[in-house]
Image (cartoon, grey):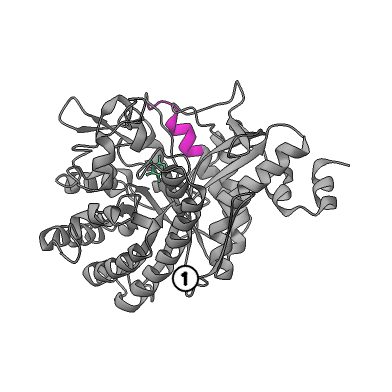
Amino acid sequence: MNARASCMALGLLPLLLAGCSERPSFEPAQINAAPIGKGLPPGFLLGTSTASHQVEGGNTNDWTDWERGTYPDGTPHILHRTPSGLATDSWNRFREDVGLMKRLGSNAYRFGIEWSRLEPTEGAWDAEAAERYRQWAHTLRSAGIEPLVTLHHFTLPRWVAASGGWENPATVDAFERFSGRVATLLGAEVDWWCTLNEPNVLAVFGYLDGVWPPGKQDERAMATVLAHLFEAHARSARQLRALDTTDADGDGRATLIGLAHHVRVFQPSTGATSDSLVSGLTDTFFNESLPDALRTGHVSLVVPGSVSLQRDVPGLKDSVDWFGINYYTRDHLRQDASPSFSHKYVPAGRDTNDLGWEIYPEGLYLFLKRYAAMGVPLVVTENGMDDRTGERRPYFLRSHLYAVERAVAEGVRVRGYFHWSLLDNFEWSEGYEPRFGLFRVERDFGLTRQATPAVETFREAARNLGLSPTP
Ligand code: FCB
């Protein structure tokens, strides 16, 4: 009996999802020969993605404090002790950045709104910052670039963090109020909303691994936080629908609401049942908890032996008009006795990015096929690579767009692809060492932006989609 048949015989869905599904293999010759972008459907959003804290500069939030800190053994929280500081100074250079987007030929831009700027203390509202965000959305729309706005991308205002952050149910109330205010502020310019970025990554890094603020290692807290985040999404979506009633792009819809979900392929390292089982369980928890909750309205979070959280969340079912996928890599798992039940690694000889993450474009295709069953269009809200020379990014971009186009050809509704990122930016714990930008940012030379070779690849895709990059 082959692996797939044995999984089916065992009736183990997680095993089937993670360990036993058939895996395609893309041929480089086919990828190189494909006319990149030609297979994307009309109206496709081809853009780039950033997050407020990673590019704006000058923010004051829970990360600002974390960035100064160290672990008990003295290791700094941020590689080389480099705080986000000025980031790419996009707070002041937004117009220049829009010029780069036009050069790419992009017709969409995903960016974040920084809660701590708008509401620096509870109930306050910074009208100047609000006006700047409104101007940004307006500038983008006037340039023919659809704004897709993220309301929460990992950072919290200090006052929210001080009152318990996402562990405190009051944060869900506060985020709901904030969402309503942003809907009123930007509704006339914005239709595409992304309530949350990667709840699973935030919960695991902040509350299980303890490597992001607030630096906890507590499985129950992690589950509570995830459940609160799912609820915050549902309530934010309700506010956005109620208060943004202007159809800014004239397509008949005033709001198109989704969120960005981080997915990873979990590959059992051997054919052993223990490796398949642990890969399946990890896949169920990490990849499936959120889509499952969106499909059913019921949150089910299970960590064998320690957590079983079951909760109905009103408004969660049918809360998305599209589903966002942030895809970067595949992990190989070998079962062991550690708290996560497995050791994660990349086998020798694999193609990796400069952070050591395996490059596996087939994974993007697999997730698009899998989440077609969500019943809403899919958007690749992030995908990119740390490439410090910039020389390998053209093929990365080509191969991942190939994955998207293959899924589209097989009938999957994909509405957009946003490359991470427009610019090299502050990469959280890794500081400024990684380079994810289509445009390289020289920190020692006044944060100047320089095109990397993948800009040409992006422009080729844009042209094939019928867009017009500026020279
Ligand atoms: C994603 C995050 C994004 C960026 C990329 C590299 O998980 O959403 O902010 O750090 O990874």
The answer to whether residue 270 is left or right of residue 461 is: right
- Residue 391 lies in the magenta-colored region: yes
State the quadrant of the C terminus.
top left
Label the magenta part by its dominant secondary structure: helix
- Location of mark 1 (residue): 319
Q: Name the residue: 40% across, 68% down.
A: 256
Q: Single out the residue that lies furthest toward the left.
A: 128
Q: Name the residue: 39% across, 74% down.
A: 238
Q: Single out the residue that lies furthest toward the right.
A: 1
Residue 291, by quadrant, is bottom right
Q: Name the residue: 53% across, 51% down.
A: 39
| Residue type, numbered disc 1 | Ser
Coordinates of residue 300 in the picture (x, y in percent): 58, 61
Q: Nearer the viewer, residue 270 or 251?
A: 270
Residue 461, by quadrant, is top left
Mark 1 crowdedness (10 Å alpha carbons): few <14, some 14-19, many ≥20? many
Give the extent of the magenta segment.
Answer: 390-398
Coordinates of residue 139 in the picture (x, y in percent): 20, 58
- The reply to whether residue 460 is visible in this rendering is yes
The answer to whether residue 375 is left or right of residue 244 is: right
Q: Name the residue: 44% across, 66% down.
A: 231
- The reply to whether residue 35 is visible in this rendering is no
The answer to whether residue 365 is left or right of residue 241 is: right
State the quadrant of the N terminus.
top right
* In the rendered image, the vertical position of residue 90 relative to residue 317, given as above or below: above
